[in-house]
Amino acid sequence: MTDKLLGKTLDDRYTVVRLLGKGGMGAVFEARHTGTGRRVALKVILHAAPEDIHLTRFLREARAVGAVESEHIAQVFDTGRDRDTGAPYMAMEFLEGEDLQALLERLGPLPVDLALRIAHQACLGLDAAHAAAIIHRDIKPANLFLARKPGGGRIVKLLDFGIAKTVEPTLGDGGLTKTGAMLGSPLYMSPEQARGRGLVDARSDLWSIGVTLYQCLSGRRPNEGIEALGELIITLCSTPAPWLQEVAPWVPPEVAQVVHRALAIAPASRHASAGEMASALRALLPHGHEITEAMLVPLPAATRSFVASRGAPPEMLATASATTLSTPGSRPGGGARARIGGLLAGALAVAAVAGASVYWVVRGDAPSGGPAPAGNATPLPPGTASPSLPTPPTPLTPLTPLTPLTPTVTPADTAGGGTAPPAASAHASSAAASTTPSLAGTAAAPAATPQGAGTPTKKSTTPSGAPTRKPTPKPNGAPPPRSDDETSRK
């Protein structure tokens, strides 16, 4: 059917010039308005029955997006249905440039300033859409387009807005997507999307922005290396993202804090709105959020070797998750595994048969290879000394039980009417830090004990304070049972 549309004028308004892309349910053409000559991207849904729910959603959401006014959203000018073929179409803003996915494949990790500018502009577009009660549900690098501006520079445009219900992409990030995938891209979907419980709101888009920004800064997604869909869903719902500075040590801690707040498992722990997240990002951009052509460069090698001051994940992540945030990248424990059945059931609930998303933009060629992941070495925070081995305690000679002795009481001992306090130990601090208490250097003043009393609680000494005798080890060398005196020192 696509060949039949080439050169045809739909509804006497849009003359089809050339095919830009094609998917399972639709195609995108370059077209021109017959009256104004305006260049547009014409998206046409193919093989759609009149009662098709996907067609209904396509037309309804196309009209909704057309009502949103933001320079950061690809505009929808018109919708309709061709009288001759019956095919529904959408006339959209024609863009030239490249999407963020192609940029990442070409450059790898981006400079921090550039990544923040891209995320900030994307949040501005989301804020306008959310104000119109429209949730994107499929934010990812392939749907953030860096369009060329007439006066130079680039501007971020959100693509496929609100179409995720109709055109569901697959797990991969390739160009035209395939039919029969989940609602949204699993690698960028939020935990609530993965559960499939219908509790998705605008904060789900903020999670996807967080994953995208994490990838821009580090060259890898927080869930990198997970291949099985079931494991991915479990991880999303139970395990906080690895701390960004562990994989990208050059990222400042205040930047990492913003990213990880967006990646909080509990929606209530994220930014309250896209506008709030945009403000947090804007505070990190003292020189503005405009993007120039000169900024589209790889991360400098000198920056890769820089280690920023160390931060820590927000404390809210520890309470937002069912697991304790202790080791970055750790997998869920037994409690999370017990929920496998429920999570997989939720994943099956969101599976749907849908068409392919097609892009209505002219994209630059990019190499097929992906960005090289950043190193995984974790440097010590600045000012942290290298760890040293603890000094082992000095071994002690086993002691034999002391024979109870009747101390000699002099008038000077009883003049105070009580027992003299023990002398302070010169090794109190070292004994407290050791697993085996040291007895050397500890002398106690004699205590006045009545005649016939039981075993004294302190070692018997002469009035001068010297021990009455040295302990003698047993012949077999085995340590004797500890006396009450030794037990009290533990």
Image: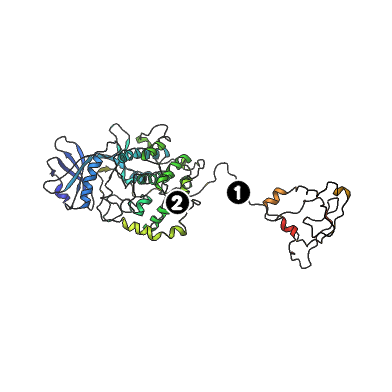
Q: Secondary structure at mark 2?
A: loop
- In the rendered view, tell whether residue 292 sits above or below residue 80: above
Q: Quadrant of the rendered structure where residue 181 is?
A: bottom left
What type is the residue that disc 2 sits on? Ser
Q: Nearer the viewer, residue 314 or 96?
A: 314
Left or right: residue 90 versus residue 224 is left
Residue furthest to the right in view is: 411
Mark earlier in primary sequence (2, 1) = 2
Residue 269 in view: yes
Residue 367 in percent (x, y) is at 33, 47
Residue 20 in view: no
Q: Nearer the viewer, residue 61 or 248?
A: 61
Q: Which residue is mark 1?
A: 387
Q: Which residue is mark 2?
A: 321
Kindly report the distance in space between the C-alpha atoms of the residues bearing marks 2 and 1: 31 Å
User: Which-is-in-front pick, marks 2 and 1?
Assistant: 2
